[in-house]
Amino acid sequence: MLNSRNFPLVFLIFFGGLFLSGCMNKQSPAEEMFNKLEEVVQIEKTFEAQQTPLIELEKKEKEIYQSIIELNMQEYDEVVRLADEAITITEKRKEHINKERESMNESKAAFETIPDIVDEIDEVELKEKATNLYNLMQDRYKIHEELYNAYSDGLENDIQLYNLFKDKELELDQLGEQINKVNAAYEKVIDLNNKFNEVTEEYNQKKLEFYEAAGIEINNKE
């Protein structure tokens, strides 16, 4: 009997939106950096919005997969119907992950102006904190790109798997091999997702430390 494939329900940690307390006249470099960092938070709202529908689609597809492996080839028409439904869901997942990537690319483009602001900071310690923030975010973008590629590989392997289910001549060895490919792809996704969350959490903490060091009074956005 074939084991059920592993399947990730990917939960990502997001930025917390903040706003600057009080009034400002001419902005300091630190205040300019604050505005840019919080602009990035708003850009990534599209990224955040993809998570709930992705999780729901993953749950639904997992249920379909379980139904398929409980059937046999004497119920071929039902297997084909379910496999086609699963492929449709996979394509919807692809749409959401692409929107997520577009949001991250937009975020990255906005973040590229940060070095110019950092150059204007005179205080050595504050400049160092700002530089560390920039480097952390670059690591985050890199990990997300790897996560996107791994998830995309998983989606392609999913589609191949469901097409195999529709093959009347399918052999168990062939099916098992494809399930192993799917599992391997999503094991990588889970690993990268954990790394992404760790870097995001560290970034969020270091950002608050930068604001505190810069004397910027902030409030949480509701």
Image (cartoon, rainbow, N blue to C red):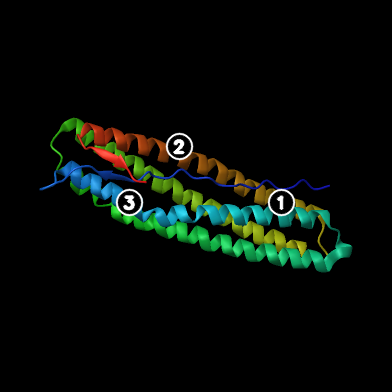
Taking depth in this image into account, of 138 and 46 the one nearest to the observer is 46
Estimate the x, y position of residue 56 in percent, counting from the top left.
Answer: 60, 54
Q: Residue at x 40, y 54 (%)?
A: 45
Farthest residue, direction right: 74
Snapshot quadrant of residue 119: top left
Are circles 1 and 3 on residues that touch, CB within 8 Å? no
Q: Is residue 50 above or below residue 206?
A: below
Are circles 2 and 3 on residues that touch, CB within 8 Å? no
Number of labels in the image equals: 3
Q: Residues within 10 Å of mark 1 (few under 14, many from 20)?
A: many
The residue at which mark 3 appears reads as 40
Estimate the x, y position of residue 30 in percent, counting from the top left.
Answer: 19, 41
- Quote the CA–CA distance across marks 2 and 3: 18 Å
Left or right of 142? Residue 218 is: left
The residue at which mark 2 appears reads as 198
Element under label 1?
Answer: helix
Nearer-N-terminus badge (2/3): 3
